[in-house]
Amino acid sequence: MRAPRIAMRGITRRFGPLLANDRVSLELEPGEIHALVGENGAGKSTLMRALFGLLAPDEGEIVIDGTVARITSPLVAMRHGLGMVHQHFMLVDPLTVAENVTLGREPHAFGGAFARARAEREVAALAERYRLPVDPRATIAQLSVGAQQRVEILKALHRGARVLILDEPTAVLTPQEVDELSAVLRALREDGASIALITHKLAEVKALADRVTVMRAGRVVGSGPAATLSVERMAELMVGHVPAPLAARAERAPGEPRLEVHGLEVRDDRGLPAVRGIDLAVRAGEIVGLAGVEGNGQHELIEALAGLRPPQRGTIAIAGRAVSGRNPREHREAGLAHIPSDRLRRGLVPAMNLAENLVLGRQRDRDVGRGPWLGGGALLAAARPRLEEFDVRPPQPRASAARLSGGNQQKLIAARELTRGAAVILAAHPTRGVDLGAIDFLHRRLLAERDAGRAVLLVSSELSEILALSDRILVLFQGRIVHETTPATTSERTLGLHMTGRATITDAPLPPRAPVPPGGLA
Amino acid sequence: MSARAARWRLLVALAPLVAVLAALAAGAIFIAGIGERPLEIYALLFREALGTGYGLGQTLFRATPLLFTGLAVALGFRAGLFNIGVEGQMVLGGFAAALVGAYVPLPGVALALAALAAAALAGGAWGALPGALKARFGAHEVINTIMLNFIAFSIVSYAGRTLFENATVRTREIAPAAELPRLETMLPALHGSPVNLTLPIALLLALATGVLLFRTRLGYELRAVGLNAPAAEYGGIAIGRTQALAMTLSGALAGLGGTNFVLGYKHYFELGFSGGAGFIGIAVALLGRNHPLGVIVAALFFGALSYGGLVVNQRVPRELVEVLEALVILFAISAQPLLERAARRWS
């Protein structure tokens, strides 16, 4: 029998007490897309990092085309025909596409100079062959995220990769870009490449993958042809039990508006208008879901509401108090709680311990310390019940926040922001990159806050989340609110059309493609 | 946690010790290279620096300014700032203390206190300047503090030459009331050594710095800014103001470092009195991991090296001790990241 292209056998890897991979085996055939699914921390990335030579397994072997290979570094992996596209791209922004793709294997002209024209020709030919539209002369900084991802794929192909590892490639893409990526991956499969696809999104697995391997807690818990595994079955395997549906929510009449925004205009980092005149109100006891494709102004809107980005024009009122948008403390004191979209950059000080992180933003509050004093035993003692209430594991106040998993970091932030008694809760992507157990927990907490009479503005790119939690839904497109609806009267499909600006005239035929943002690719 | 991982974590925690041992081992090669026996030299060095009352007093005297400057650098680092201007802040602090001690007519202890306050104010002002420039304009403090060092040296040199005494660039002696007494008056064992009251002041300030950093709201904000500025901003902390304040406090600590020589030892200001204590303070902070306790230990170590190096001068040249100091700095910078990487790989 012919050997598979890649066979990982009995891979075991420990991180301290944690068994990240426990005798994991995985095979990749030529011409197949193999999806690797599992919760955060299930061991998918560890396994793929071992394959790409980024970390050494404690036990087990990797067999490539029938021979045992010792992959000690990414360089060795590339020599074996492996390529990896990381979630965070490894590109040099000021250089051009051709320079990035050929980096390290540049074609040389006489005398050792960089043969730019030849590099551009090579890259153009490669892009043509695999139908990866990208301009070899564009600089990376000019490209959209989807185009940058294509450059990463081209880079791997230029090094002769026959095995591609993609780490959550769709997490950063718009729905349209996801379609384009899918087409590229299918073309590569036709060409005989082997593709390992790490993902959370089970619908994508069904649509794209030939085979699926499900991991949980470092072990393979299920494997087989994608056609024979239903989405429900995969979800069950991933979490180990069937997730209980959210409890039916009590209908309650919302109260007074607690967050009021009028005529808000905000610019992005480059000084271009990002929020172009928004009016919205969130009332006590309701969750308003703000749906939209990433990059349509939600980031700037959130920052303005949180006091982190001064608006150009317009007013914000929190619990009846006008706030300026230029001072986070002012917004907090008016009654805002904020779960930020980037927990490691904004939401936490990873090097500080859990108890210290629980007072971030409250460090001047009277109830966390006496006079000028803050810290010590009192801070640790106050932290313990909070950590237990919000199921932060492990609930050790002295442990540093960096050591928590993503889901537990998010619960830590929730434990801080949802216990302040704030009138308005701004929840930005509260469950992004978080495992299913934590998602369920956070959803229940947000609903409980709504029932307790808080005004919740939920910003999320996960439509299922918006639909499950919201009382009202607003759709943001190019800095404006273009649609308002309720979960009962809409669907993911309808929302998707509004999010891409294609539903303004519902009876007209769809335009061929969504408008390309300025600076987007060719 | 597995035993192997626990051992690695312990080793990472002991990185400064590993750095010192590695530096001594590397220094041994140099000592052997000039035909001396390294172990003998080291034994002599540390016996003289720590083994006798006089030697210990000398070590403590040399450690005192390093305590101030080490704390100053550490406080800056904690707020995410690299204060290379400690040397200039210290020189200005010493100069201000000398002027107050010599020209201000105050009685008794009041004069000593006023001289100390002048040192802290002058150093603090010299730290506040780059701090404010950073907060207001985002001007990088490394560049500005380096430049301000030169300006500080020039100011004291000019003022010393033209406004005060003669061309020797030293000021008039301070009034006896401003003098800080030597510790030998209380501890006879230290007989003859110049260690003085500035040492307990430095130790108290180390304690105060620790309390400030780890037990107050201000210290929390300062550390949050240093560890993750965007998160601090999210938490409503005014980053610029906090950093400017940290630079001011850092400069004040550095300024007080000048009093060891001026108020406690020679009783006048003299150009070049610092002996580079401001720059060694960077090494002290690094080796002490920006923690007040670590700074105390590191300052003692460099103090011992400084005095011990003088003692072994007959057998090994002075430059060799300077090489040893440089090696400690080199290893102190590299040991922690190297050990952390090894720990990640092997545990």
Image: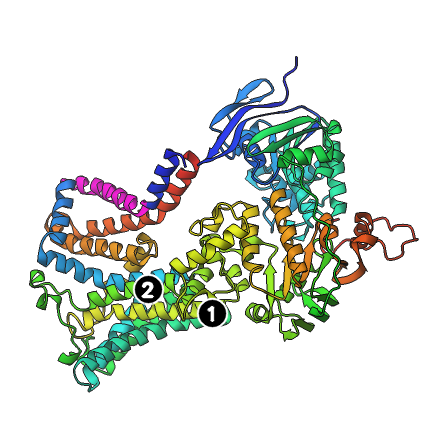
Q: Relative to B94, is A251 on the left or the right?
A: right
Subunit under mark 1: A
Q: Is residue A445 above or below residue B69?
A: above
Q: Is residue A360 visible?
A: yes
State the mark number for residue A366: 1
Cβ–Cβ under 8 Å for marks 2 and 1: no
* The magenta segment: B14-37
Image location of residue B66, percent across then percent down: 25, 61
Asked whether residue B228 is drawn in magenta, I would say no
Total numbered labels: 2
* Viewer-side residue, B233 vs A371: A371
Q: Is residue A286 above or below residue B29?
A: below
Q: Quadrant of the N terminus of chain B?
A: top left
Residue designated by label 2:
B209
* Viewer-side residue, B14 vs B82: B14
Front tag of 2 and 1: 1
Asked whether residue B27 is drawn in magenta, I would say yes
Q: CA distance from mark 2 to mark 1?
A: 23 Å
Res. B41 image quadrant:
top left
Task: Specify the amino acid type for callout 2.
Answer: Thr
Image location of residue A282, percent across then percent down: 71, 65
Q: Is residue A128 visible?
A: no
Q: Please identify the dominant SS of the magenta region.
A: helix
Residues marked 2 and 1, same chain: no
